[in-house]
Image (cartoon, helix red, strand yellow):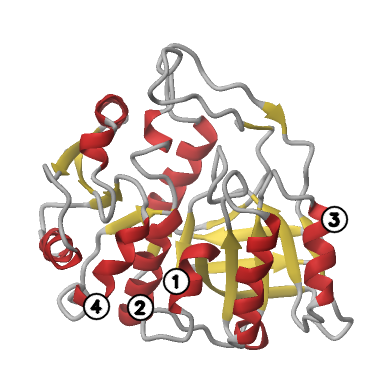
Amino acid sequence: MKRKVAVFSPSTVAEIKYKKQVNMALDNLRKLGFEPITFFQNKETRGRERADLFNKILVDDSIDIILFTIGGYKAIELLPYIDYCKIQKTEKKIVGYSDCSLLLNSITTNTGLKTYLGPMLLPNFCEYPAPFKYTLKSFFHSIDDISWKKIKIPDKYFLEIIDWDGSEWGTRSRKSVDSNDELKFFKNSTNIENTLTGTLLGGNGDSLVNILNTEYFKVSSDTILFLEDNSDELSFENWIRIMTAFQIHGFFDKVKALIIGHMPHFSVTLIENFLISLNLKIPFVIGFPSGHIDPIVTLPIGGKVKIDFSKNEIMVKG
C-alpha cells in the first residue's frame, strides 16, 4: 500500500506562486511510490486558519507523512494554535527545514515526538531530472530505519540557482562543485569525553532565534544543538548576530555540543575563529550537510546523535 503524504504550506502559498515546480515535485513523489494528498489553499490566509488545517492533518489517521511545501516567515504564526495534546500520540513523520524548524522543534519540545529536519516539496523534490540520490537515501533511512548511520559528506554540492521563472528551469540539472570539505571537529577541552551522545534539536538559526527560551524551544544538558543558515541570502555579520543571541540566551552554556551546518558562502576559518572568540566550553563541529544546501542529510529532531572525536565521525539514529 502506498504511503500517503500530506503536502501542506505553513506560510507561503507556494501552490499559487510556483505551480510548475509543485506539479513536478508531486510527480516525483508518485514515482517514488508515495501518494501525495494536497492540502492546498487558493489564497493567503491568517495563521489561525493555517494552524486549524495543520491540526486537522495531524489527527488524520490516513496520513503517514506530513511534508511541508516550502518555508516562509509566516510559519511562526502557527505556534500558538497547534493542538499539542491531540497530536501527542501521532505516529506521522513531519518533515521540513528552514522556517519550518520552528514547527518541528515546537512539536518535539511540547510532545516528545520525533520530527524530521529534511527535504521539502520545494525545492528538494522538484529537482530536474529527479531529486538527488544522496538526499533521498538519507530521507528514507530516517523515516524507515532506526539504526545508527554514519554521516558521510556528499561528493558534490549543487550550488547553482536556476531561476524558477526562467527558460532554463526544468530543462537541465544544476551545476555542481566538488565538496572538497570534511567535517571540522573541535573538542575544545581535554576534559571532554571522546564520544558524546545526546538528543538532537535545532535547525535554521535565523528562524529559531525568534523563540529562544520560550515554551516552543528549550534545550537541556542532554541536547546536541544543530544550527544552519542560508549563506546565499544571509550576510556573515547577520549570522554573527544570530549566534550572539543564542549565546546571550544561555544556549551554549546549557547544551552538550554544537553542530554547525555547511554554509558554502561563509569561510570555515571565519566560522571557526568566531566560535573560538565566544570562549565556548562545549565542543563543536563545522560543515554538516543539512539545511540550505543540496544534497542534504535528514536529521531526527528529538532523535539521537553521536559525535566521536577520536574518529572524527558523526552518527545519527533515526
Which image quadrant for residue 180? top right
Name the kind of residue labelled 2 in the image. Gly
Which image quadrant for residue 241? bottom right
Can you give x and y, in whole percent of width and height, for residue 267 in the image? 79, 50
Circle 3 is placed at which residue position? 269
Can you give x and y, in whole percent of width and height, for residue 36 in the image? 19, 38
* Mark 2 or mark 4, earlier in chain: 4
Residues 277 and 216: in front is 277
* Mark 4 or mark 3, earlier in chain: 4
Q: Residue at x 65, y 38 (%)?
A: 154
Circle 2 is placed at which residue position? 112
Q: Are marks 3 and 1 in contact (CB under 8 Å)?
A: no
* Mark 1 or mark 2, earlier in chain: 2
* Mark 3 or mark 1, earlier in chain: 3
- Which of discs 4 and 1 lies nearer the camera? The answer is 4
Q: Which disc, if any, is residue 80?
A: 4
